[in-house]
Amino acid sequence: MKTYIHKVKYYETDKMGITHHSNYVRWMEEARMDFLSQLGYGMKRFENEGITSPVVSVECQYKKPTTFDDEIEINVKIEKYTGVKLSLSYVMTNIATGDVVLTASSSHCFIDACGRPIAVKKYFPEFDRIIKS
């Protein structure tokens, strides 16, 4: 799996010239979408089948600030998968300095169009197999 690279945009910074903390969660989502696409199961594929995957929880530990034009490498790893819930970890590193700027985790469930939790194996057995391997 290749890592996701995000280049900090000017509008993502605040008056002090550092990235506003809320943007890291957006980058996590960008990296998660890329990660799922690399597995062959992008969100569009899930949504076309009536499945969504809302965020259940997010936790971030901010280590170092980032600024405009920094290139941030985002590594995504599966931490836990139950068949209904998927937990991921993220490590964001400033490519130029090698500094870890954030470590984080997010948890997501899978639900049908009525908002009921689903067992992924039933709808996407291949995705289930890939995640478990």
Image (cartoon, rainbow, N blue to C red):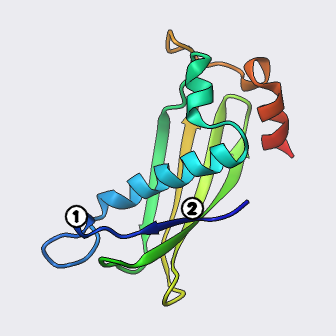
Left or right placement of residue 49 versus residue 124 in this view: left
Q: With respect to residue 64, does 38 lie above or below?
A: above
Residue 84 in the image: state x and y as whole percent: 67, 28
Q: Residue at x 39, y 53 (%)?
A: 26
Left or right placement of residue 81 versus residue 132 in this view: left
Answer with mark 2 or mark 1, whichever residue precedes in sequence.
1
Disc on res. 90: 2
| Residue nearest the observer in this picture, 41 or 123 | 41
- Report which residue position mark 1 lands on: 11
**Image quadrant occupied by the N terminus:** bottom right
Residue 98 image-quadrant placement: bottom right
Residue 34 in the image: state x and y as whole percent: 59, 50
**The furthest residue to the left:** 15
**Amino acid type at mark 2:** Tyr
- Number of other residues with Cα within 10 Å of mark 2, as a class: few under 14, some 14 to 19, many 20 or more: many
Disc 2, SS: strand
Query: Cβ–Cβ below 8 Å for labels 2 and 1?
Result: no
Q: Residue at x 31, y 79 (%)?
A: 67
